[in-house]
Image (spheres, grey):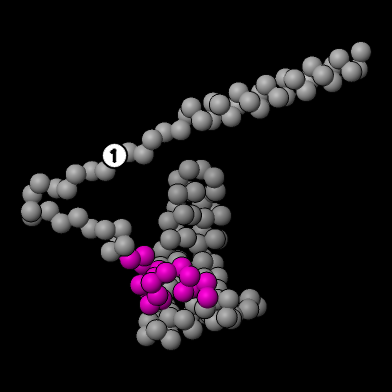
Amino acid sequence: MKMRIMLFIGSVAIAITITGSKWAEASVVPPAPALPAPESPGIALQSPQAVQDPYHAALGVTSDQDIYDALYDGQTLAGLATERGQDPERIVRLQVAELTAQLEDRLAGGSITPAIFAAQKAELADIVSRSVYGTAAG
């Protein structure tokens, strides 16, 4: 009896595997066609590479890999910015602004109370500053 059950379960598993892979092949969506060039010569399209990330600009780097390499070598974000002629406080301001916006979204969504919002917002500048400059909490 147990052998029949095992054979049945094995057969069902194989059938599901085979049909599952066939469904996956059938659901592949072809790539979207390329958009034609704009008709008007006065329209200039901006390439994605031309838009620089504000954090990259504030650090004076061109890629996440530059940041990763510097941090891996033990450098702080402030050290990286200073080395490249940038103001480290700009990074602090950018991060505080982004985190504040996230807190505001959480407050508006009801996931935090106004008291928690105020307490966390009060700590943001100090926490971010310590992170950027690589100083210990204390």
- Location of the C terminus by quadrant is bottom right
Residue for point 23% across, 43% down: 35
Q: Is residue 24 visible?
A: yes
Q: Is residue 93 visible?
A: no
Q: How many marks?
A: 1
Is disc 1 surrounded by few (<14), some (14 to 19) or many (20+) residues within 10 Å?
Answer: few
Circle 1 sits on which residue?
Answer: 33
Percent x, y of residue 50: 28, 64
- Location of the N terminus by quadrant is top right
Q: Secondary structure at mark 1?
A: loop
Q: Is residue 30 left or right of residue 68?
A: left
Which sits in the foreground, 74 or 24?
24
Percent x, y of residue 30: 38, 35
- Answer above or below: position of 61 versus 19: below
Residue for point 60% across, 26% down: 20
Residue for point 54% across, 49% down: 113
Residue for point 54% across, 61% down: 120
Percent x, y of residue 102: 46, 54
Q: Amino acid at mark 1?
A: Pro
Q: Is residue 3 left or right of residue 50?
A: right
| Dominant secondary structure (helix, strand or loop) of the stretch shown in magenta | helix
Residue 60 covered by magenta stretch: yes
Q: Quadrant of residue 48?
A: bottom left
Residue 36 covered by magenta stretch: no
- Answer above or below: position of 51 versus 89: above
Percent x, y of residue 60: 38, 77
The region drawn magenta spans 52-69
Q: Is residue 51 left or right of residue 4?
A: left
Which sits in the foreground, 9 or 89?
9
